[in-house]
Each structure stands twice: as structure tokens, then as C-alpha cells.
Amino acid sequence: MNNSNTFSQKYISRKHLHLHLLDACNLNCKHCYLGDKSGKDILGVDDVKYILNYSYNNGIRDVTFSGGEPLLYPNLREVIEEARDLGFEEIRIQSNGTVKNFDHSILNLIDYLCLSLDGPTSAINDSIRGINTFDKVISLIKEAKRYKCHLKINCVVCNSNLDYLK
């Protein structure tokens, strides 16, 4: 029976790598699965490059850099450039959108900036993610429009925001 093979050929066109660079994060979201966010658990740049090379050589064509907060990763530009040089077709950063001090020019090297926004107002979003997070994300959305990357919004659905998402 060849149904499962036909299914994968029809619906799974490219394989995707989701690379968790580090556990460090600048927020304490209510729903977060990370325990220690001190940044002790971090992938070395050589390890990341090895994973990227191995993955690309085995057919992976899309990569998402996440964490913790990937914008806190000290070698983010270097690993994005490695992914681009290898030929990855789609490169994403999945961020909480609240880090201000990062090299914004990396937004020209990626295809998607995926930002977390868990409500339509600061009151709802900030009750889940922390004070002033809504305004910081909105600010980064406005800033990101100046660069090549596309924007994507991620929302964690929970009791605090469910009524506002219907």
C-alpha cells in the first residue's frame, strides 16, 4: 500500500529544521515551557553550523531559529549567513519581539520574522507576556517594514485571550 508515501509527497513538500539556539529569554511569559532562562544552555556556533550543514545535506530546506529568545544569541548573524550560504530556501526567526539592542540589518537576511503577540491590546497581551511587551512588539513591527523580511504573528491561545480571538 502506497497511501502514506503519496500523502507525504502531496502535502509535505519541504522538510523544516526548528533550531533552538539557547534557553536565555528576557521575558517570563505565563505559558512558557522553559525552566531556567539564565542562558546556561546555549548551542555553540560550531555546533549550529554542523547541524545546518548536516540538515541541508539531508534535504532540509527551511530553518527557524528560536530559543528562548534568538535575538539574544551572540552569533545570530553568523549562523543566519551560514544558512543563507548553504542555500536554505526559507529562513525564519521566531522572537518575542521585545529585544531592542540587536543588529536590525539581519532582517534583510531572513525571509520571515515571526513575532509573539497574544492579544489585540496592551492590557491583554501584557497580562500574559509582561509589562510593555505589546508596545515593544508593535514598535518592532513598524521597524521591520523597512527591511526585506515578511512578518508573521504567533499567538498563544489561552483563557486570558480566548474571548478576544473569536
Image (spheres, rainbow, N blue to C red):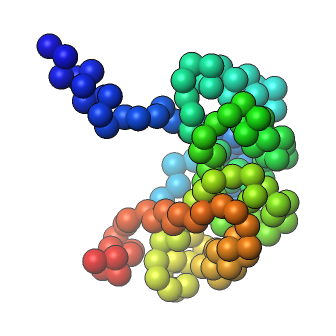
- Residue 41 in view here: no
In the shown orientation, is residue 164 left or right of residue 57?
left
Q: Where residue 81 appears, x then y in whole percent?
A: 79, 41
Q: Where residue 32 appears, x then y in whole percent?
A: 53, 55
Q: Residue at x 56, y 69 (%)?
A: 129
Q: Is residue 3 above or below residue 102?
A: above
Q: Where residue 34 appears, x then y in whole percent?
A: 58, 47
**Image-quadrant location for residue 96:** bottom right
Tell me the quarter of the image containing the C terminus.
Answer: bottom left
Q: Residue at x 56, y 39 (%)?
A: 62
In the shown orientation, is residue 132 left or right of residue 9?
right
Return the residue found at the far left.
1
Q: Where residue 149 appears, x then y in whole percent?
A: 66, 61
Instruction: Report the label total.
Output: 0
Q: Is residue 13 above or below residue 26?
A: above
Q: Residue at x 45, y 65 (%)?
A: 155
Q: Is residue 64 above or below residue 1?
A: below
Return the residue found at the far top.
1
